[in-house]
Image (cartoon, rainbow, N blue to C red):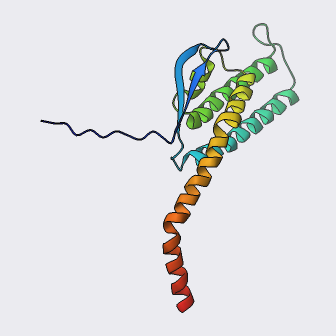
Amino acid sequence: MTENIIKLNKSDVLTLKIQTNEGKDTGEVLEFDLGDIELPLRYQELIEKDKKNKEYLRNQMLIIDKRQDVKGKKLLSKNEEDKIRALNEFFIKEIEVYNMFLGARGVEKLLNGRKFTWTTLQEIDEIIEKQIAPRLDVNMKNITDKVKEKYAQAVKKNEEIEVIE
């Protein structure tokens, strides 16, 4: 008995291998299906939620700065402790937002065991801007062109009907 096998086409998949600063493979990869028409929407959502998270953090810091500071339970003052908690909450929200776009554990893969810091956001933004976003732009144009080409005749037929009426 022969088996029928279906091989999946992965030509529209952008695979980014992750390496350390020394150039050693971490064994982790980020994959983006460039044919996924929702991918640009997730990228847009990332940008919007990131902006909202930063605005929320800025507001929290302003509120904390306006309060009178008192001595904390240990080394830090009450306001300093609250700022650290606000930053920690911000980082948790940011990891969730970035993973929504990068895929499951995307941020963790890029961190490769390091802690999430403010510079991590800059590093990830740079990776997205230089290596992923340009491919998204090209692919969106390709998808748009394919859709226009495929449905151009249907649109022409609709235009002809409208002209006749």
Q: Is residue 94 above or below residue 22?
A: below
Asked if 112 appears above or below 145 in the picture, the reply is: above
Q: Residue at x 49, y 64 (%)?
A: 150
The residue at the far bottom in this view is 165
Q: Nearer the viewer, residue 163 or 110?
A: 163
Residue in the picture at 72% in, 25% down: 87
* Residue placed furthest toward the front: 2
Q: Is residue 40 left or right of residue 74?
A: left
Residue 62, given in percent of the width and then of the height, sits at 84, 32
Q: Is residue 46 visible?
A: no
In this orientation, which residue lies closer to the viewer: 165 or 156?
A: 156
* Residue farthest toward the left in the current orientation of the protein: 1
Q: Is residue 70 left or right of residue 37?
A: right
| Count of numbered circles in the view | 0
**Closer-to-camera residue (102/137):** 137
Query: Percent x, y for residue 13?
Result: 51, 38
At 74% across and 20% down in the image, what residue appears?
84
Please tell me whether residue 32 is drawn above or below residue 44 in the rendered image.
Answer: above
Residue 145: image quadrant is bottom right
Is residue 95 something that shows in the picture?
yes
Where's residue 131, x and y in %? 66, 34
The quadrant of the picture occupied by the N terminus is: top left
Q: Residue 75 is drawn in which quadrant?
A: top right
- Picture residue at 72% right of the left edge, 41% below the top: 52
